[in-house]
Image (cartoon, grey):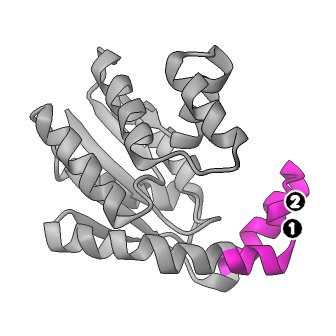
Amino acid sequence: MINVLMFGPPGSGKGTQSVTLAEKYNFLHLSTGDMLRAELAAATELGKKMEAIMAAGELVPDDVVIAMIAHKIDTTTGRAGFVFDGFPRTVEQAEALEKMLEKRKMKIDLMLVLEVNDAELMDRMQKRAMVSGRADDADEAVINNRIAVYRAKTEPVIEYGRRAGVARIVNGVGTIDQIFARLCNHIETVL
């Protein structure tokens, strides 16, 4: 199985591209946010545990998120691999993911990093806000903070991927199809 990590700042298009890549290559699209919401909605044991944590205003601990991902991997059949959408977000999460995958005789095969300048990100998110109504995409200060948090917290994970030899920087500016073609070129190298 192939494991692809998709990275990029907010507004870079990683969610859109992850879904399309998953469809093309028969990967399972793993978005931890979607997975958390599904566990809560299904009222699973894990969902109940997370609900209590979130009700207390705490972040869901890394070990719980990794357990959720491990369960998804262990119960998925008929897929060629997984595309992780915006996860891991910290070096600690990357290390935990790597250990969990190693136990399953798997590894991180590729880290695709969409590179988009801040002005383009701002423009994309403000346009997205008009369509989606997401308040966090409309406020310039909030957008700048989200980008700053990404740069501070998540960019070190990219360096982790570089050291492991799996990170590939991809120009994230252009049409959706142009960017998709660039991403596919990198995936083809690990298939």
Q: Residue at x 37, y 57 (%)?
A: 183
Q: Decide: is 113 above or below 63.
A: below
Q: Residue at x 54, y 73 (%)?
A: 150
> For the residue labelled by badge 2, is the local secondary structure a helix, a strand or a loop?
helix
Image marks 1 and 2: residues in contact by CB distance under 8 Å: yes
Category of crowding for the residue at label 2, using alpha-carbon neighbours closer than 10 angstroms: few (below 14), some (14–19), many (at least 20): few
Q: CA distance from mark 1 to mark 2?
A: 5 Å
How far from the left and from the top, in percent, is residue 73?
31, 26
Nearest the eye: 96 or 88:
96
Is residue 110 shown left or right of residue 28? left
Residue extending farthest to the left is 105
Nearest the eye: 22 or 31:
31
Q: Decide: is 12 above or below 38.
A: below
> For the residue labelled by badge 1, is the local secondary structure a helix, a strand or a loop?
loop
Q: Residue at x 87, y 67 (%)?
A: 138
Splitting the image into 4 quarters, where does residue 120 fall?
bottom right
Task: Indicate whether residue 121 is drawn in magenta.
Answer: yes
Residue position marked by numbered label 1 in the rendering: 138
Residue type, label 1: Ala
Nearest the eye: 15 or 135:
135
Range of residues picked out in magenta:
120-145
Residue position marked by numbered label 2 in the rendering: 135
Is residue 160 shown left or right of residue 88? left
Query: For the image shown, how many numbered marks are present on the structure?
Result: 2
Quarter holding the C terminus? top left
Residue type, label 2: Ala
Category of crowding for the residue at label 1, using alpha-carbon neighbours closer than 10 angstroms: few (below 14), some (14–19), many (at least 20): some
